[in-house]
Image: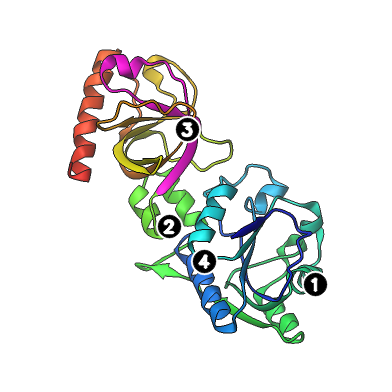
Amino acid sequence: MLTHNTITYVSPCPCVLALGCFDGVHSGHREVISTAKAIAADAGLPLTVFTFEQPPRNFFAPASVPIITPPAEKARIFETLGVDNAIIIPHSAEIFSMSAEGFIDNIIIGRLRAAHIVCGFNYTFGAKGLGSTDLLTDRCKSNGIDVTVIPEYRMGGQSVSSSAIREAVAAGDMKTAAILLGRPYSLTSVVVDGQHLARRLGFPTVNTIPESGILLPKNGVYASRIRFDGEERFGITNVGIRPTVDTNILCAETHIFDFDGDLYGKRITVEFIEFIREETRFPDVDVMADQVKNDIITARGIFGI
């Protein structure tokens, strides 16, 4: 898959184009992409996705919407879904000031050479988000371009949306988040050096500092699945500021079961499987250690190990 991060990209050939913000690349987004993939396969054309690094709202009010999937993760998921070209552009005054008609004429038709377009029912575009699926359909039809609009996607009676996923993750409801996403919610970060207190207490941990602007689960302890170097491990992860030891630095601290290796400087992915308890200030580290031992027992029970 080729990834581009500029709106100046020009498609070398006609393509089937999937449009959307795709933050989370959740189950509803994948319905859009899988439909576009099938159309592309039937037409013998490449599948191109046009999206943004962040929700467009953040261009007008920076950091107002926490990001579910950073650009690199978004690109990785697109590749697993069979996307041939992903255009993941940073926020651009040019694109957000462009009229809806100008976006269709200059970007969709002129640069991307779309032969067929697929988008969600609530897709908007152009200055002030005034472009609608009706406008897109009508204007593209006059240019011989078909548009397929995917209706609202629901699971268990609930609408699948990035907003619903943010609400679930922020509430620590990782089971609902996983259902809506179609996978566990995760954070990928580089392991940094810590205080080594947990190691002295008998449960070594790895510390990661989440990227700024990324959606975080509510502070607390979670049963977690950890991926690194092609391995899959289980453990517990505390998200928060570790008030018992007064660090006051927001981090994700993970104890990996039956592992004592060195991961400093490596990128690991922590998948949040189930909320166990709230983050707590304990009277001393010994009381904290006893609770962590109970958390480990609880998490092992969740995983059946």
Q: Residue 183 at x, y = what percent?
A: 39, 55
User: Measuring 53% from the left and 69% from the top, which residue is drawn there?
Assistant: 33
Q: Which residue is mark 3?
A: 266
Q: Residue 260 at x, y = what percent?
A: 30, 26
Q: Residues within 10 Å of mark 1 (few under 14, many from 20)?
A: some
Q: Which residue is mark 1?
A: 110
Q: Which residue is mark 4?
A: 82
Q: Quadrant of residue 225?
A: top left
The amino acid type, in three-letter code, at marker 4 is Gly
Counting residues from the start of the chain, the first of labels 3 and 2 encountered is: 2
Q: Are marks 2 and 4 in contact (CB under 8 Å)?
A: no
User: Measuring 40% from the left and 53% from the top, which residue is drawn there?
Assistant: 177
* Secondary structure category for the residue under label 1: helix
The amino acid type, in three-letter code, at marker 2 is Leu
* Secondary structure category for the residue under label 4: loop
Q: Residue 39 at x, y = what percent?
A: 55, 80
